[in-house]
Image (cartoon, helix red, strand yellow):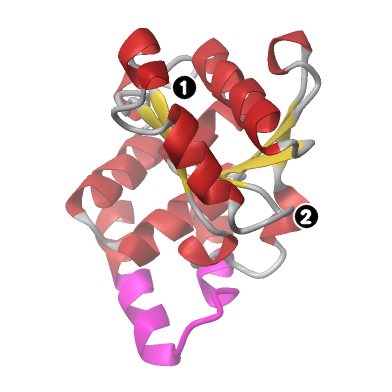
């Protein structure tokens, strides 16, 4: 996905839901901070999104611009409606959101996870594709090891789970 495609999804999600802010939490959130991110980080055709306005907006997003929708068939990319609770994120993540707001979003604010928060959320999820994504971020010096360790400590999870996330990071950091 390219930055202008994410902006299109933000614009469409805002129009569908009536929300002035669309939060982007999946891998394509990297486009907020890094519009020129390496191609390997931009292979996904989907952007995971939610609004702070109403949890039911997830269904509106999925039904209108989600996978298999006419929007998806027309443009080749789509949004997946999520809920705020979908991702486990470090304390303070909302204060670090990166805003995309321009004419292409029709001034709807796309609020994208900051790179370290995104990487930590990927490590919590623990899937192979998430591990590879974080490794790619690390390989391109997009995340700082000290900040990653701090953010892992800020996760609202139990000590055993936090240790597991730290081990996942340790294997990538090498």
SS assignment at label 1: loop
Tell me where residue 26 sits by quadrant: top left
Task: Residue under label 1, please give it.
Answer: 37
Residue range (magenta): 150-167
Which residue sits furthest bottom?
159
Q: Camera-side residue: 78 or 26?
A: 78
Taking the image as drawn, is residue 141 in sight? Answer: no
Q: Nearer the viewer, residue 49 or 32?
A: 49
- Side of 138 where 40 appears, left or right: left
Marks 2, 1: nearer the viewer: 2
Q: Residues within 10 Å of mark 2 (few under 14, many from 20)?
A: few
Q: Position of residue 103 (x, y in %)?
A: 77, 9
| Residue 77 magenta-highlighted | no
Position of 55 with respect to 132 (left or right) is: right
Residue for point 66% across, 22% down: 11
- Quadrant of the snapshot with the C terminus: bottom left
Name the residue located 54 percent from the left edge and 41 percent from the top edge. Answer: 60
Residue at (75% x, 39% y) in the render: 19
Q: Which mark is residue 95?
A: 2
Question: Considering the image in quadrants, where does the N terminus appear?
Answer: top left
Q: Residues within 10 Å of mark 1 (few under 14, many from 20)?
A: some
């Amino acid at each position: 996905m390219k930055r202008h495609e994410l902006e299109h999804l933000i614009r469409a999600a805002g129009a569908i839901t009536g929300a002035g802010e669309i939060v982007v939490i999946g891998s394509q959130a990297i486009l907020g901070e890094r519009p020129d991110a390496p191609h390997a980080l931009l292979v996904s055709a989907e952007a995971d999104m939610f609004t702070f306005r109403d949890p039911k907006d997830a269904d509106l997003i999925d039904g209108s611009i989600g996978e298999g929708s006419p929007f998806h068939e027309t443009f080749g990319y789509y949004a997946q409606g999520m809920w705020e609770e979908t991702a486990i994120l470090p304390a303070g993540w909302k204060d670090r959101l990166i805003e995309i707001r321009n004419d292409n979003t029709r001034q709807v604010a796309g609020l994208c996870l900051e790179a370290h928060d995104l990487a930590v959320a990927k490590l919590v999820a623990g899937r192979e594709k998430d591990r590879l994504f974080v490794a790619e971020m690390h390989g391109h010096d997009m995340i700082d090891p000290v900040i990653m360790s701090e953010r892992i400590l800020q996760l609202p999870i139990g000590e055993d789970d936090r240790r597991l996330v730290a081990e996942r990071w340790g294997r990538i950091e090498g």
